[in-house]
Image (cartoon, helix red, strand yellow):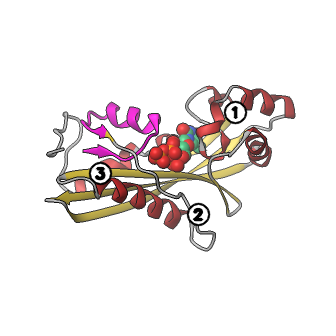
Amino acid sequence: MVLASGSPRRKELLNNIGLMFRVQTSEIDEHIDAHASPQDNVMKLALQKATAVANSCDDAIVIGADTVVVLEGQILGKPSDTKEAVEMLQSLQGRVHEVFTGIALVEVRAGNIYRTQERARCTRVWMKPLDRDRMEWYVGTGDPMDKAGAYGIQGIGSILVDQIEGCFFNVMGLSVSLIDEMFKNWGIQVGTKIRSQGV
Ligand SMILES: Cc1cn([C@H]2C[C@H](O)[C@@H](COP(=O)(O)OP(=O)(O)OP(=O)(O)O)O2)c(=O)[nH]c1=O
């Protein structure tokens, strides 16, 4: 197995379910299509990430994922600087938003793409009302800078979140119950260490 993601959170979540894999990242242009739904955007980006890595594999199952935050139909990715991080938090504080994560599996056999699967899941997140000092303090910790929507539910950013509806791990970057469903579709059982398939 190959995880086509540089996200340390996704690596940790897949380690937790006993998967054996290596990490290989690729440079793709993470372009959001404003005319497509959030689900379609995250599934497409997840597939692009997995396919870019799959193209350099002979025999492997490659996992790609992508996470976005959606506020009233507007898609937020990762902040490009601290100013944008504060702006994102300003728009999210005191309100509910949605987090979409797409997962793609690409299986390569003898250097050819044999089959693919893409799915997406949505979680609703209620963020506490935050004053300017609180937002600037949080951005100053550096935690938001590599995360969609400029916050991380799993670390120090957890104190900003009131409640969620749906899968917690989906917000963190990869729903483990969803990837288990996808593995099951291909007859793969997690929980015991899964041997790398040729790469
Ligand atoms: C909302 C939220 C996002 N995130 C993270 C998950 C993703 O890693 C990141 C969204 O950016 P992505 O582009 O989905 O992923 P990435 O750039 O980290 O890694 P790669 O493209 O190599 O797969 O935001 C959290 O860790 N916690 C959260 O609460």
For residue 10, the mark is none
Q: Position of residue 143 (x, y in %)?
A: 63, 31
Direction from residue 68 to residue 135 in the image, left or right: right
Q: Which quarter of the image is occupied by the N terminus?
A: top left
Q: Earlier in the sequence, mark 2 or mark 1?
A: 2
Q: Work out how far the residue at label 2 is from the one at label 3, CA to CA, in angstroms.
A: 22 Å
The type of residue carrying mark 1 is Leu
* Residue denoted by label 1: 160
Disc sitting over residue 62 in the figure? 3
Say which of marks 2 and 1 sits in front: 2
Mark 3 Cα shell of 10 Å, populated few (<14), some (14-19), many (≥20): many
Q: In this rendering, does residue 171 appear at all?
A: no
From the viewer's side, name the closer residue of 151 and 54.
54
**Magenta-highlighted residues:** 1-22
Residue 48 falls in image quadrant: bottom left
Tags 2 and 1 touching, CB below 8 Å: no
Q: Is residue 44 visible?
A: yes
The numbered mark, 2 or 3, whose residue comes first in the sequence reads 2
In the image, which is nearer the foreground, mark 3 or mark 1? 3
Q: Residue at x 64, y 37 (%)?
A: 145
Report the residue marked by disc 2. 32
